[in-house]
Image (cartoon, helix red, strand yellow):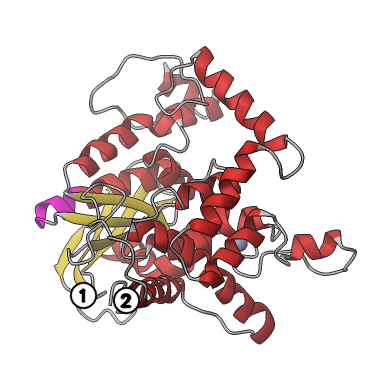
Amino acid sequence: MVAEFSGSGGLFRYEARQILYIPLSFRSPADELICNYKKNGIYSVKSAYHMLMHDKRNKAPGLSNVYHQKLWQKIWLSHLHPRDHNFLWRLAKNILPTKANLQKKGISLDTSCPLCEAATETAHHLFLHCEYTRSACFSSNYGLRVPLNSYLNDWISCCLEDPSSVSDQLKCTVLWHLWKARNLLVYRQKFTDPRLVAKEAMESVIEFNKFNPCIKAKPPAHNLLEVPISFEVCILQVDAGCFDEGFISFGCLLRNQAGRVVSAACKWEEMSANPVTAETLAIHWSLQLAKELKVERILVQSDALSVVNCIISLSLLTDIDHVVLNCQTFLRSFKFASVVFISRAFNCDAHNLVGLGKRLGSRTWLGLPPNCNSISVCPSVAS
Ligand SMILES: [Zn+2]
């Protein structure tokens, strides 16, 4: 019936094409209603109550409420450099001279974020939503993930949760280094690679702990959120492209922790898919390749933000849900695995492989593709 409607004279040609774009499920799960506000998709009165109370608490005026008192206490008592105490306090009070705050004071200026130029530069954007920030945090030794659906002060509070944890120290310190990188760009037009921001923040924490050894740093946990520094995490950069003739192409590069290309692959397939579906299928395909190469710890990088958000359960897109579920199952089979969004500028090598897929068909190489000059060797993320 769908094929009938999708014909040239069909009344519902667009709708039929959208249906055809949905890849068939590998497991054929039953249809179900999903609540958008819960990670597990199941509505409960308790979750609605917490959502409303959270909102109410954050709108409460003054500094005297219990929530803020606890936050100030956490900031000033945390085992951090005094510079970071001061910075976190100014950040939590929203008194940093961000462009949005300067505009509120009557200064006329371009308020776009200098790091991504994609939104107004508020503290909320700069330290939670900015692509640059998210890349810097995730490229740190601990693969820090900044929550998209959080309030800034909740995130600061979360960063200060465990005063004896190096990862929490790093979460706080990286915020100051992000602000420093932002200021270097604004006032000296000097761009800092986000990976360098993460590296400098880690060095700063190590140096501080060396001269202030009053806490017993806990060894990092072996879970999805925290990666032991000594363990090698491979980086898998993935991209996909859709072509008019009803073909899709995938490209992926596997890099070791030093940034060198271990393997590269492209895939050319006859299939109608929208870009979001193609990106999801590309991640699924690249994870299969990583498994075949016996990779145990992996950091997947994709420039498809909506797909990344679905895979890390921050949002839901029903038409790719079953492929996302398969990706999540795959990810759980690694000793460490995480998926992070990177901007297209940082994913150009995988993008070039998509083009190679169109020219050469499906190929896999150990190391770089022969005669391929367009793949760069990125600097180490951990050294
Ligand atoms: Zn930004």
Q: Nearer the viewer, residue 123 or 167?
A: 167
Q: Alpha-carbon neighbours of circle 2 within 10 Å: few (<14), some, or many (≥20)?
A: few
**Residue 370 found in image quarter:** bottom left
Is the CB of the residue bearing disc 1 within 8 angstroms of ligand 1? no
Residue drawn where x is 32% and y is 29% of the image: 322
Disc number lying in front (2 or 1): 2
What residue range appears in magenta? Answer: 288-294
Q: Quadrant of ligand 1?
A: bottom right
Q: Is residue 25 visible?
A: yes
Residue marked by disc 1: 368
Q: CA distance from mark 2 to mark 1?
A: 40 Å
Residue drawn where x is 72% and y is 36% of the image: 59
Q: Is residue 291 magenta?
A: yes
Q: Earlier in the sequence, mark 2 or mark 1?
A: 2
Q: Nearer the viewer, residue 375 or 225?
A: 225
Measured from the top left, where is residue 255 in percent x and y? 23, 68
Residue marked by disc 2: 210
**Residue 311 found in image quarter:** top left
Q: Quadrant of the C terminus?
A: bottom left
Measured from the top left, where is residue 183 in percent x and y? 63, 77
